[in-house]
Image (cartoon, rainbow, N blue to C red):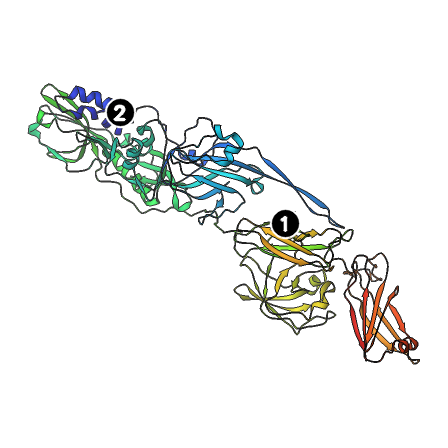
Amino acid sequence: MATLILTAVGTALGGPIGGALGALAGQQVDQRLLAPGPRQGPRLGDLSVQTSTYGGDIPRLFGTLRVAGTVIWATDLIESRGTSGGGKGRPRTVTYSYSASFAVALSARPIRAIRRIWADGKLLRGAAGDFKSETGFRFYPGDEDQPVDPLIASAEGAATTPAYRGIAYAVFENFQLEDYGNRIPSLTFEVEADQGEVAIGAIASALSDGAILAGATPAVRGYAASGQSVRAAVQALTDIVPLSLTDDGATLRLGLAQGEAMTIAAGEETERRRIERSALASVPDEVSIAYYEPARDYQAGLQRASATGGPGQRADRRQLPAALDAGAAKGLAEYRLAALRAGRARARVALGWRRAATGPGALARFDGVGGLWRISRWTLGAARVGLELAGMAGGAPIEAPADAGRPAAAPDLPHGPTVLRAAELPLGETTGGRPLILAFAAGGAPGWRRAELMASFDGGASWSAAGRASGLATMGVTLTALPARPSTLFDTASALEIELLGDAMWLEGADDDALANGANLALVGRELVQFGRAEALGGGRFRLSRLLRGRRGTEWAAALHAAGEPFVLIEPDRLVAIEAPAGALGGVALLSASGVGDEGDVAAEVAIEGDSLRPPAPVHLAATREAGGDILLRWTRCSRDGWSWTSGAETPLGEQKEAYRLELSGAGFARAVELAAPEWRYTGAAQAADGASAPIDVSVVQLGTYAPSRPARLTIA
């Protein structure tokens, strides 16, 4: 439709006298701006597949569109090595991670912004500008004064690195590839080149550097223009919407054939009018348009218009590399169907020279003949002006009711900041006297996934990698305080209310068999507690009851609780075990976590008191006064190897030797002895020598291989 109009523009430039000059000028305009040839614009799928083809065409983007771009620079994969774990019962694991740096060209004309980014179809950058995977990122909008990227310059040399002026591109630095199979993923970008919708005429005007002015044309949400001429760049649009290129004597204007139609009277025709209509079966009875649907994250959409109300037998299918609302795409399909059916009619008419000023693109009506016609060709002959006309639908495309389809959008979940908690707990086996620090990391935001951990054991003078917290630890704070209770029976009198950090966290109850196997173990303050019941209160709050207290020898902390304490559920796959160096006992462990959503490192500090090394405190400490005045002290040892009593026999010692330190004190005296057995007789003679009198305070600790136990205490009245 447009081709015939455009090739005839020159004849109308100079009127009847200047027809020859006008034809030549028109041919030059056509060749410079709208050169004929095969279609060069991108097909619908071209914008969704990332390429790195040398010399490949980079589209010029308009409006807002999702495109893949072209990789214009990249490094080789960078390998990083890390270790984690180790110690008795825990193998040391060596892990390898990979990253890459690369640049992606997006548009051959400047753009305003990059919004969301997808990697292998998963959201990499959210609408708020937050990244879901770790990467450095820089954006160059394509200005003519944009600088050279420093990373590319450092790799290639500043003197040989182009600034890619006029090309909008993005640079990813040290992009972590673990989430994508250790390869550079296929990226697509939501690019905003121009604010709001952009008219087809405005696109042609921009591509022709203003040689073509924009008339009334339909608008699209976004468009990718490719090709060596304006015609090639906009042909995907003009294939669907019939447009006219008209000349007012000074400028060329692209637009719909609109305005007041002239009336051709039968009496002014110098030759007999010829009107032909092709058979209805010669034109499609269905038009379908494939396009990009913004409501579905710019995934491909399809809208149809049918003359029969159902599936057509003769279909006209078009691919439009443009972003459209569903209603606009439906309107274009209906408009094209109407235009194809109206275009079956062709007319030829000869008029006198007084109609010489009539140009291609003008509208006309015939006396006595219904319908609207558009002049598609103008020729000048001897004392006559010949016009060729085509029937047209009239008006302009309008939005039609349409369904965009069900969205299949990738969730845009912000990663958010990291919350880091750490403690030295008697939960694992250590080797060589190295204390074991357990780190727990999580985030309250729904998209939190992981954080890199660093540790320092010399006050922050040096730091080393401590592994990756890649599981969302279930954590929160206590809303009430637990009262002190013994560790020997179920605590059915107490209940603990807590509030979890995020909505993705949940707690479930456990039966007694599961509790016996270690289920629902949690750190509350410094006490390890198991809970059999978990009642959801709403808003991330839970009430925990049927408690087992002082687990793993932490009964000493049962009297230290207050509201607002940290709560952490102990889950082996959601913690990171960090071994402190030998000799760290009595020092401090400094930990830091760095996640995608953290503006800086998140810190935690743990005093290394030996809880992971020491045996449990002795139990059943008792004093018996004998008839002769002696006091017999007895107790039962506990073992780090005896948390699960499965054999029914005496539990293993768990230390290199059995040894205890017994301390007695009272008014004006103190005595300490070291023992190899769990009993000692405080004779009457020794009491007299010490000047001991009631009350007498007794403290017993087991001397472990690496650290003493916490004391068992008793007062003799």
Give 677 or 647, whichever is nearer the viewer.
677
Q: Is residue 64 above or below residue 19?
A: below
2 or 1: tag closer to the N-terminus:
2
Give 107 or 397, whichever is nearer the viewer.
107
SS class of the residue under badge 2?
helix
| Horizontal side, residue 168 vs residue 94: left or right | left
- Residue 30 disc label: 2
- Residue 287 disc label: none
Report the quarter where the C terminus lies.
bottom right
**Residue 468 placement (x, y as % from top left):** 62, 48
**Residue 322 placement (x, y as % from top left):** 36, 38
- In front: mark 2 or mark 1? 1
Name the image quarter holding residue 689: bottom right
Give 196 or 365, whichever is nearer the viewer.
196
**Residue 247 placement (x, y as % from top left):** 19, 30
Q: Is residue 258 above or below residue 459?
A: above
SS class of the residue under badge 1?
strand
**Residue 384 placement (x, y as % from top left):** 10, 22
Q: CA distance from mark 2 to mark 1?
A: 66 Å
**Residue 549 in sight from this viewpoint:** no
Name the image quarter holding residue 554: bottom right
Q: Amino acid at mark 1?
A: Met
Q: Is residue 559 above or below residue 75?
A: below
- Binning the other alpha carbons within 10 Å of mark 1 as few (below 14), some (14 to 19) or many (20 upward) gives many
| Horizontal side, residue 66 vs residue 285: left or right | right
- Residue 454 disc label: 1
Q: Amino acid at mark 2?
A: Asp
Report the quarter where the N terminus lies.
top left
